[in-house]
Image: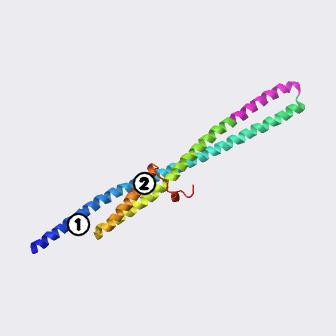
Amino acid sequence: LFKRAQDAAGQAQDRAGDLFDKGREYFEEQAQRLTSAFEAGRSAMKEMLLAQQQSSDQWAFYQAKVIREHLYRAQKMRLEADLADRAPAAAREKHEALLKKLDEEEKRYNAEKKDIEKDAKKLEALRDGFQARDPYFLVGEALLQIAIVMSSVSILGRSRLIFSFSLILAVAGGLLTINGYFPLFQLPFFHGGH
């Protein structure tokens, strides 16, 4: 009888040791996933902010081009009025050459602002892409943190139910993190109606 009790206690210790070993390995894996999710989220946020800043810079450059275009247009219109009203024949040639140059500058600024607008819209699209990915990293990271805590609790309490729950959270956190890297699905409540 004593021998049976010792064998049963030894088997229970072996099972507990297995749970501790599995729990430790699982804990290490989740910590690695958490680190990956954290770094990816930070990177996505930095890229989003950089794209926003570059987009704002492009729109400011666009506005400067529009102002210059309007200035050249106004100068051209004024010169046209002066030319039509009272330009003597000798000054007329000079005014027409200046008028032609102002017209060319206006057209150049108009073409440049179209290129700048395209660049600004590309940067806005890039920003929007990173902004859409960021919530998946954030929630994935939170779920992985909770999974790590729950796995620690399951080890201390030797509860397979809590361990199973931590596995579910870890899988959900891992899927959301993967979706942050490679958008496979879209959850509507993550995008705030965008």
**Residue 151 appears anywhere in the view:** no
Badge 2, how many Cα within 10 Å: few under 14, some, many 20+? many
Q: Name the residue under label 1.
A: 16
Q: Name the residue under label 2.
A: 177
Quadrant of the rendered image containing residue 30: bottom left
Horizontally, is 122 left or right of 137 in the view? right
Residue 105 lies within the magenta run? yes
Question: In the rendering, at what x and y percent does residue 56 appear?
Answer: 61, 47
Residue 37 lies within the magenta run? no
Residue in the picture at 85% in, 27% down = 92
Element type where label 1 sits in the image: helix
Quadrant of the rendered image containing residue 61: top right
Question: In the rendering, at what x and y percent does residue 175 appear?
Answer: 41, 55
Q: Is residue 142 above or below residue 112?
A: below
Tell me the amino acid under the disc marked 1.
Ala
Give the numbered dot on residue 96: none
Q: Between disc 1 and disc 2, whose residue precedes? A: 1
Which stretch did the figure color magenta?
Answer: 88-109
Question: In the rendering, at what x and y percent does residue 98 appear?
Answer: 78, 29
Tell me the amino acid under the disc marked 2.
Thr
Element type where label 2 sits in the image: helix
